Structure formats: C-alpha cells, structure tokens
Image (cartoon, rainbow, N blue to C red):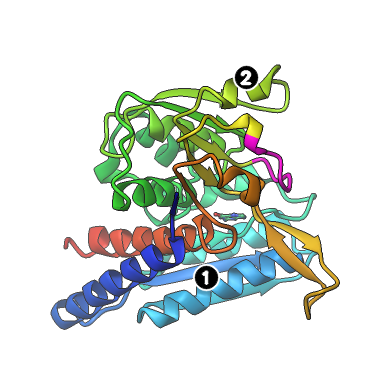
Amino acid sequence: MVLIDGKKVSADLQEELSATIRHDRSITGKLPGLTIILVGQDPSSQVYVRNKAKRCKEIGMNSTVIELPDETTLEEILERIALLNADPETHGILVQQPLPPHIDEMSVTLAIDPEKDVDGFHPENIGKMVLGHFESCHISCTAYGILELLGRYGIETSGRHCVIVGRSNIVGKPMANLMLQKLDSANCTVTVCHSASKEIATLTRLADILIVAVGKPGFITAGMVKPGAVVIDVGNNRIGDASTKSGFRYVGDVDFDGVSTVASAITPVPGGVGPMTIAMLMKNTVNSFHRSNGL
Ligand code: GUN
C-alpha cells in the first residue's frame, strides 16, 4: 500500500514555486501578491487563512489578510474587492468561505476579476475549465491539487472509473469535471454520488479511483472499497479527543485504518490533500502574476 504524501509533494512544489518567484523577480523586480479576505470569527477558517498566508510568505510571495467583522455588509466586501481588482500589486484575491449567512456568496464570487480569482470559483473560470481552456483559466485548488498528486505518484487514470462522493461547488463538481477531461492524470469514466444517491456502497465499490468529499468522519469503510483502489480523502473533520493537548484532532471522511488494508494507495488526514490545496493556490497566484506581466 502506498501512502500518498501530500505534505512532501506540496513541499516539493513550494520549492519549485520559490525558485520561479526568485527568477521572476530578477527579471521584473516584482513579486506575486495574494490578498485573503476573512469575514467573521469561524475558528476553522481562521486556521486555514493563517496557514495560507504563512505558506505564501515562506515561498517569498507577498500576502495580506484583511479581517472583517461578522456584521460587515455585502457592499463593504464588494468595495474591498473593487479596490483589489484595480490594484496592480494584487494578483490573487481569495474570500474565505463560508461567509456569514447575510452575505450572498455568489455576489462576492462574481465581483472578483476572473484573472485574480485564484480559487477558480468564478463562473468564467469554471466554464473555461469545463470546456478545456486550461491555459486561460484558474482551476479550483483542491481538484487541481488532487490531479497533481495522482500525476506525481504515477497513478494510471486514463480509461479507469473515478467515483466522486460529494457534489459541492468547492470540490465535488470541479473534481468531476476535471477527471473527465482529456488530460494526464484524468481522462476517466466519472460517477458522482451525493446525499440522495441510493446504494452508495455499490457505486463506491466500482471505483478504481475513489475521491471522497462529504465532511463526515469515517464515512467510507473498508467494505465500500474495491481491493486495489486508489483512495483520495478530502475530508478534514475536527473531532473531540481528550488525549490531545488541544482537546481535538482532525480526521478524514475515510476510515483510514480499515480502508488502508484494501486500497493500493491512500491519502492520510492530515498531510494528504490539505497541503496540496494551499500549494495550488500559490501556483494559481504565480500563474496570474505571469499572465499580468506577460511572462
Ligand atoms: N473554504 C474551504 N475551502 C476553501 C477554499 O479552497 N477557498 C475558499 N475561498 N474558501 C474555502
């Protein structure tokens, strides 16, 4: 069984990006810049945003976090976005989700210049990705990171059956569309299961590549996996654990101990998909920098 080490792959990618940034700076005198907007006090979002900003600094990129209170209005957020859209030193804009319930997420997504939408959430980027115009779009980071992991581990995907569990806009839908593209590490037959699907275990057992993003700890058990399948766990669920100093720990959507006895390869949680999402966010920001500087 192969443990797919996202921490290692993302560190390699980080090295590559850092070298690119140094090289670009020697030519242009400029650095890529990412601005993250965080609205409210959600503890998981605060951790994610802090990690994203820290990792950007580590590779020599500019990063700014704008923290706004819970009661911020949609108009105030849109004003901030308009300023960032016009700022030549900002190449990536990310508004952390979920947003407070009074903010319409779609209005926020639509306000971001698609060139700076390094999350790949804007309909223009989603549409270009679905149509296969990869050179002019940003691909959503988690799906892109999973493709990169499959590629770097030399996992054969072409013509194989990829089953995705979950249909969120952030992971399931972009993932399904990416896996059916005629691309290395994709070109699959794709099935998507969701909360209304019947006989989920029958469907997941058909998977050569099983990708799970449902937000339910240990949802996929060994009996739901075909022996030899590759299992990608996107879950990152915080559960109580009195034996840890913090009183909690993070687990995936896959019962790792059981499933690792039948899978041919599996991502751990933490240290699998999570670090890759941040690495691809930085890669999208560097790509945006390149496009805006004609590199
Ligand atoms: N919330 C959880 N994951 C993400 C992500 O990839 N981007 C944004 N903007 N919010 C998130």
Q: Earlier in the sequence, mark 2 or mark 1?
A: 1
- The residue shown at (79%, 50%) is 102
The range drawn in magenta is 214-222
Hey, what amino acid is under mark 1?
Lys
Task: For marks 2 and 1, give the CA distance.
Answer: 37 Å
* Image coordinates for residue 259, horizontal then vertical, percent: 60, 43
* Label 1 packing within 10 angstroms: few (<14), some (14-19), many (20+): many
Above or below for 191 versus 124:
above
Hey, what amino acid is under mark 2?
Thr
Q: Name the residue under label 1.
A: 52
Q: Ligand 1 lies in which image quarter?
A: bottom right
Do we see residue 40 in this rendering?
A: no
Q: Mark 2 points at which residue?
A: 202
Asked which secondary structure carries label 1, the reply is: helix
- The residue shown at (53%, 33%) is 173
* Label 2 packing within 10 angstroms: few (<14), some (14-19), many (20+): few
* Image coordinates for residue 86, horizontal then vertical, percent: 42, 64
Left or right: where 61 falls relative to 290: right
- The residue shown at (40%, 67%) is 8
